[in-house]
Image: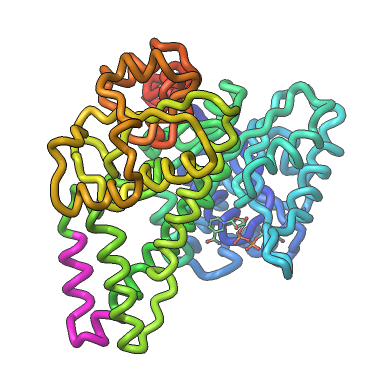
């Protein structure tokens, strides 16, 4: 599909809707914005933005004058000729923290009600922030009678105050859905921006938005707590954080950003404990950093529960050290996992390519012998021996490709605790090839 002008209805002309409508018009699309709030609609008809956002007024004025942007209070009018309906209504918090979907339900029912005689295809793209499953469970059922209406997720990532710039220079464009043509139709809206769209599944698109906002909140809280500790120690927190950000390999990078097993080893748990202990002695509460070890413990508990849910059988564990390419066993989460399995009477054997008990000394040796005195009897010297003996394999450490292939080839059922995706290579994510074909 080549880049082309589309007719777009934008439903909801708040911060997200108005910026989206004006900027899509600027990209050359024909845009009709709709809102139940007459004041916003009249503002746009008069060529002014209904609220302050740097640069927005000028775009609204120019695009209304050029005839590419108009507005209405009528959903029917907005969607009449539309190829895409972008849903930008509010999803505010309820008192219990849940998000309210009243506006979402209402606007989709409105579209359905006015689509009875429709023959032209329509892609309903949910731009509002909604919890994973909302498109499938709340939006799609509204259109189940309409074979020409498809639903995709297209979350918005703009920030108020820089919303126009964020639209024009997007940090991320995500379109999710299972109908390839519908997904591509929405991705093509942004083709003039020259930015690759990430095409993913519907639920992935919905969750990415929450993951991004949670990540931003986590980053802010982290920087603030390090800053507070720095202040208390009479250290320049800005200098600390700026220096931390100089490390683009481990700190500001994709390192550690992969769901996997709990962390362990001789540094992270020890240093977090010291940091929070010493902060408490300074009468400084750092609840975010204090919660990290608890979070890690909960993650380990989930893994233990998953492994213990296996039927009573022979369980082969791949990995013993706290991560790959080391023989360091100190505070290895695998050791805690094994202790639990042994405590529940599970029949286990362990293989780790870098562990030879006879070559482990000092605190490393003491740690493992204190935790599991009979560890030597559980160790399998060769992977093949483990694979042959076991009914189930638990992958507790990232395996190199050759070992992953051998585990896979064994055909034994695998619990993958580290996210190496043994057995899922073929399932993969939406390929880069698809991405290129959309915007290329
Ligand atoms: N504001 C942001 O910075 C931002 C950024 C990214 C995502 N989001 C998400 O985008 C969504 C919209 O946010 P917002 O800040 O623009 O909300 P908003 O409250 O400013 O705007 C929502 C608009 O929808 C209109 N509306 C409600 N029901 C309607 C209906 N049935 N028909 C037509 N219009 C209707 C309302 O009148 C209002 O003008 C939310 O889910 C929000 O979480 C917001």
- The answer to whether 12 is drawn above or below residue 377 in the figure is below
User: Residue 321 falls in which quadrant of the image?
Assistant: top left
Q: Position of residue 182 (x, y in %)?
A: 60, 26
Secondary structure mainly formed by the magenta segment: helix
Q: Position of residue 278 (x, y in %)?
A: 28, 80
Quadrant (top left/top right/bottom left/bottom right) for the C terminus: top left
Image point (68%, 49%), residue name: 11
Q: Position of residue 117 (x, y in %)?
A: 85, 27
Query: Is residue 179 among what the camera can see?
Result: yes
Ligand 1 is found in the corner quadrant, namely bottom right
Residue 233 belongs to magenta span: yes
- The answer to whether 345 is drawn above or below residue 20 in the figure is above
Camera-side residue: 246 or 166? 246
- The answer to whether 237 is drawn above or below residue 319 in the figure is below
Residue 54 belongs to magenta span: no
388 relative position to 343: left or right: left
Query: Is residue 221 among what the camera can see?
Result: no
């Amino acid at each position: 599909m080549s880049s082309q002008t589309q007719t777009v209805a934008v439903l909801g002309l708040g911060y997200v809707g108005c910026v989206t409508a004006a900027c899509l018009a600027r990209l050359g699309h024909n845009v009709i914005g709709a809102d139940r709030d007459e004041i916003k609609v009249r503002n746009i008809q008069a060529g002014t933005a209904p609220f302050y956002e740097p640069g927005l007024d000028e775009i609204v004025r120019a695009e209304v004058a050029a005839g590419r942007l108009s507005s209405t209070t009528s959903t029917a009018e907005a969607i009449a000729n539309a190829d895409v309906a972008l849903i930008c209504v509010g999803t505010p918090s309820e008192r219990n923290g849940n998000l309210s979907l009243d506006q979402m339900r209402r606007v989709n029912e409105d579209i359905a009600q006015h689509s009875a005689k429709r023959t032209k295809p329509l892609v309903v793209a949910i731009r509002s922030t909604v919890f994973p499953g909302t498109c499938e469970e709340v939006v799609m059922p509204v259109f189940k009678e309409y074979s020409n209406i498809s639903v995709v997720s297209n979350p918005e990532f703009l920030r108020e105050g820089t919303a126009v710039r964020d639209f024009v220079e997007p940090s991320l464009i995500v379109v999710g859905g299972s109908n390839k043509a519908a997904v591509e139709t929405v991705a093509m809206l942004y083709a003039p921006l020259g930015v690759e769209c990430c095409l993913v599944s519907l639920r992935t698109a919905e969750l990415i938005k929450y993951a991004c906002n949670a990540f931003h909140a986590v980053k802010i809280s982290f920087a603030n707590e390090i800053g507070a500790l720095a202040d208390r120690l009479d250290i320049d927190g800005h200098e600390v954080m700026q220096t931390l950000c100089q490390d683009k390999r481990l700190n500001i990078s994709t390192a550690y950003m992969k769901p996997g097993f709990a962390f362990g080893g001789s540094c992270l748990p020890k240093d977090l404990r010291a940091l929070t202990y010493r902060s408490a002695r300074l009468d400084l509460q750092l609840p975010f950093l204090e919660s990290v070890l608890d979070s890690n413990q909960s993650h380990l508990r989930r893994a233990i529960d998953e492994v213990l849910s296996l039927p009573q059988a022979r369980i082969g564990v791949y990995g013993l050290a706290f991560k790959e390419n080391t023989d360091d066993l100190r505070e290895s989460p695998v050791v805690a996992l094994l202790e639990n399995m042994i405590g529940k009477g599970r029949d286990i054997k362990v293989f780790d390519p870098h562990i030879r008990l006879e070559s482990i000394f000092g605190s490393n040796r003491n740690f493992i012998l204190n935790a599991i005195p009979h560890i030597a009897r559980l160790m399998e010297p060769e992977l093949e021996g483990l694979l042959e003996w076991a009914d189930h394999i638990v992958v507790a450490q990232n395996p190199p490709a050759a070992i992953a292939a051998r585990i896979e080839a064994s055909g034994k059922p695998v619990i993958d605790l580290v996210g190496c995706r043994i057995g899922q290579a073929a399932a993969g994510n939406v390929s880069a090839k698809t991405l290129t074909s959309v915007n290329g």
